[in-house]
Amino acid sequence: MQKIAWFIKKLFGIVGTLIAMLLTFAAALVCFSLSWMFQTWSNLTMDELVYHLQSPLEGTNTGMVEEYIQMCVVPSILILIAIIIGFAGLRHRKKYYVFMALVLVIAVAATSVSLYSAGEKLDIKDYTKSQGSYSEFIDTYYVNPAETGMEFPEQKRNLIYIFLESMEITYADQKNGGGFDENVIPELTEIAKENEDFSGTDMKLNGAYALTGATWTMGAMFAHTSGLPLNISIDGNNMDTQDSFFPGIITMGDILREEGYSQTLLIGSDATFGGRRLYFTDHGQFDIVDYNYAAENQMIPEGYAVWWGYEDQKLFQFAKDKLTELAAQDSPFNLTMLTVDTHFEDGYVCEQCRNEYEDNSYANVMACSSRQLGEFINWIQQQDFYENTTIVLAGDHPTMDSDFCEDVSDMYDRKTYVTYINSAAEKEVDDPRVYSTFDLFPTTLAAMGVRIEGERLGLGTNLYSSTQTLLERFDVDTVQRELKKKSKLMEELADLNEDDQELLVRESGAPIADIYVDSYDFRTGIMPVILSNIRNFNGEIQSVMLAVWTEEDQSDLQWIPMEVDENGNYNGRINVPGFGYKVGTYMIQAYVIGGDGTPVILGEAAGVVS
């Protein structure tokens, strides 16, 4: 019995020691990793984290990997070594098991505190709640490009679309609509003022809101070119295992390829990172000219690598060479570029950078980027192809640098930089527009001279038109709240197989109409609804009705008849007093009643009473 007791005690000591050491290392790694993560990504969102956890790590900045090892792995190993030394020093002593228990308690407590703090910062509770509920917002307001008429000009215009890494209008001075005392992007400021940023008659810069699902580079590139947020649930669409990237959507790349455009993606990093290669190959069959391509084709010296690949001064030179090549072709071209020097943390200081801002590395990099872009745009404008070329400069998302904007007032609305140069479109209104990066999808096509039926694509609105954007129709908080929730349409678009196109919510042969909900007029108590362009309905239209409700169970459902006007449009009036002046979202479905009395749904919309 004594030997058995000794053996059990010995076994407990060995197993307990191993568990304590493993937990200590794991706890230290978790604590250091979370601390490093929030220092590196100061504005990290849960949807961005979920996306990158499911994306391939290939193409990640090697400097960032080395930093993680130094800041997280090495200290964790050192703590483990210290614990091992502690166990060795207390071997055969009574305090051995006290030390073991203390180590276990500290490891569990530290991990719990770190995870709780991370959960608070990422607002995991709200994210989980949102992921547990569905919203019909995207399903209702998404305009499918496959079902929207588009007419290109007889002479198709070239497109140069430059994604500016982390570029905000915030970096301008307050006099010009920025948030800084001193303007660190003077060239970009002048370019915006001389061209179009949709600020109307206001002399201050105007930019785009980056909404949920569009606050990191791949999410931004997706939003700018599809008008949709890159929202993927934790249990769906692992991008590192997918053979296709949202096969159910039609993007700008798809549209231009169909129109015979030659398309190139030019970036100084590995295009595989974040799913960029897959997306731009799937949607538009872009020629990918990335860091790997440059290395394989001796565009850069053998073994050359800085920052995320190669710096922007090389990118702009390669762009000049590529544009000269593309301009010599017979087909119109789309050159899409992505700068990288202004990536967090603190940017990449190249040989062209000056020390203008008292050793503020990021400000110096921003100023350098502004100068290089000014010179590049000036070069393009001197080329023969410029006359028939539209240029778009668009910040991909707000910066993730941890402290660059720490002195900017919390009351200041941070927006991404946007400017359209040499547009073929004319504005219909002179008021400043309130818009998001989703709106750049149809606006870019319009700037190329494309006529768009209904002036909307994806969740975006053509900003040259007088049609309201979703942010003008609702508000930023309302749209953000709905975008955080799951969407059945997005799930179908993400998981759609190429041979399964019939799963789209809006089949091309189904009856459909354009539904516009006007603003609620508190003076009359009326919220007007206009329905137009009924299509794919064969037969006699006996009447058109609206089904309206505010309660989730539709317990307050009301049917409202619509009246046809001289233009063939149908008009309905939602009587808000009839709903007890209820504040919130009014869900609306439009139905056409045929000659046989059978109601057929034409579409859905929503109105807001605030």
Image (cartoon, grey):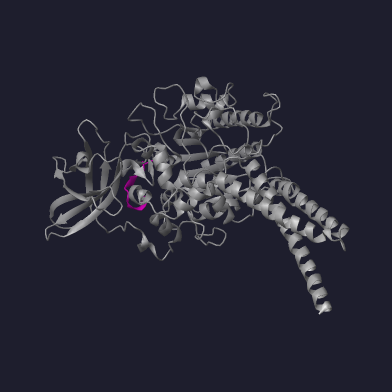
Task: Answer whether residue 159 is magenta in the image.
Answer: no
Task: Give the camera-side residue of 42 and 101.
Answer: 101
**152 is within the stretch colored magenta:** yes
**Extreme-bottom residue of the structure:** 1
Residue visible at 54% across and 48% down? 46
20 up-or-down from 558: above or below = below
Please give the name of the residue rendered at 66% of the width and 39% of the height, measured from the top-left corner.
311
Instruction: Please say whether residue 331 is visible from this viewpoint.
Output: no
**For the view shown, which residue lies furthest in the top direction?**
175
Q: Is residue 114 left or right of residue 452?
A: right
| Nearest to the observer: residue 501 or residue 610 | 610
Which quadrant would residue 408 be assigned to in this image?
Answer: top right
Q: Residue at x 29, y 47 (%)?
A: 605
- Which quarter of the rendering shows the N terminus? bottom right
* Residue 587 visible in rendering: yes
**What span is colored magenta in the figure?**
145-155
Percent position (x, y) of residue 242? 53, 61
The answer to whether residue 289 is left or right of residue 95 is: left
329 lies left or right of 571? right
